[in-house]
Image (cartoon, helix red, strand yellow):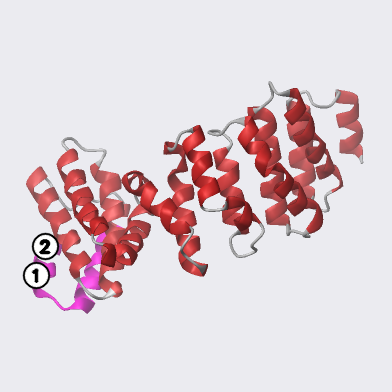
Amino acid sequence: SLVEMMETESNDKVICGLQLNAVIIANEMIPWVNEEQRRRYAEAILKTFKNPSSKVYQPGAQLLGICLNQIVKEENSQEVLARVKDNLKRMERDRSKTDLLMELLYCIHKGYPMILDSFMSRISESIGKAVRKTKCIYLEMFLARLEILHDHELYRTLENFKIRYLLKQTEYQKLALHIVNKSIDKIQSIDFMKFFEELVHLLSSSHPDAETRTILYEIMINATEKFKDNSQDTHRTMSIILKGFSDPDEHIQNRVLNFLTQNGGLPSSYALRFQQL
């Protein structure tokens, strides 16, 4: 069993065991039959976090995420969840383990994103200090669960880690755009419009690729739908959406056309003419 393997085997065999167990549970073959076995199984995985090798604790954290995704569907799952969170919270209080904590959270959240809910403040605080790949990892985690933040709190957080600056940086641009897009459901119109000029500039002046343009048009479409009661802001977002008709990417043209025709943005006669063109 995994519990016995953790206590007796070499790192190489433990790594193989962790990877095999991840495949087994991902295919809904559960290796425990009662709560005690489930508890011991989770405890065995948590022991990998003390191993100095990332080759052990990373697959351990990935397996834990897959396990938690299964465990929360079962009865009396709170004890295991509390044990995992306590373990991670102790790590959070030790500043020397911040990098390890973030690495573990990233691996766990791939299988169980809600593990991040108790650590969103730490994640958002860390974004501003991080660089390159590490910053991308923190942004990806923030994106995964930003919906738990409320409107003004979310907007302040975006400002604190300088989302507008990230929109201008090629390395972080797409993640920053996805964050803005997902934030639309939570923030107020007045706060969204503070990003508007950066988004327009990005679309018109920096020659973005098709993927980036697609996200930008999605942002404008989602903002138009969310803030439809504000005619001034809707007029501004709609003026950008209409530019999608002249975009070289056919998928963007079709997305804009579908949005406008389905939402009554164009008379049917105009829609027909655009389709013919």
**Front-lying residue, 36 or 226:** 226
Is the stretch drawn in magenta largely helix, strand or loop? helix
Q: Which residue is mark 1?
A: 7
Query: Which mark is drawn over residue 3?
Result: 2
Q: Considering the numbered disc 1 on the image, is that residue within a helix, a strand or a loop?
A: helix
Image check: 182 left or right of 91? right
Instruction: State the residue at coordinates (63%, 51%).
Output: 164
Q: Considering the numbered disc 2 on the image, is that residue within a helix, a strand or a loop?
A: helix
Residue 185: x and y, percent? 55, 33
- Under mark 2, the amino acid is Val
Instruction: State the residue at coordinates (55%, 41%).
Output: 182
Image check: 92 left or right of 246? left
| Magenta-tinted stretch | 1-23
Q: Number of numbered discs present?
A: 2
Q: Say above or below: 184 vs 199.
A: above
Contact between labelled residues 2 and 1, with CB atoms less than 8 Å apart: yes
Residue 250: x and y, percent? 79, 49
**Front-lying residue, 79 or 68:** 79
At label 1, counting other C-alpha atoms closer than 10 Å, the crowd grade (few under 14, some 14-19, many 20 or more) is few
Instruction: State the residue at coordinates (24%, 56%).
Output: 93
16 drawn magenta: yes
At label 2, counting other C-alpha atoms closer than 10 Å, the crowd grade (few under 14, some 14-19, many 20 or more) is some
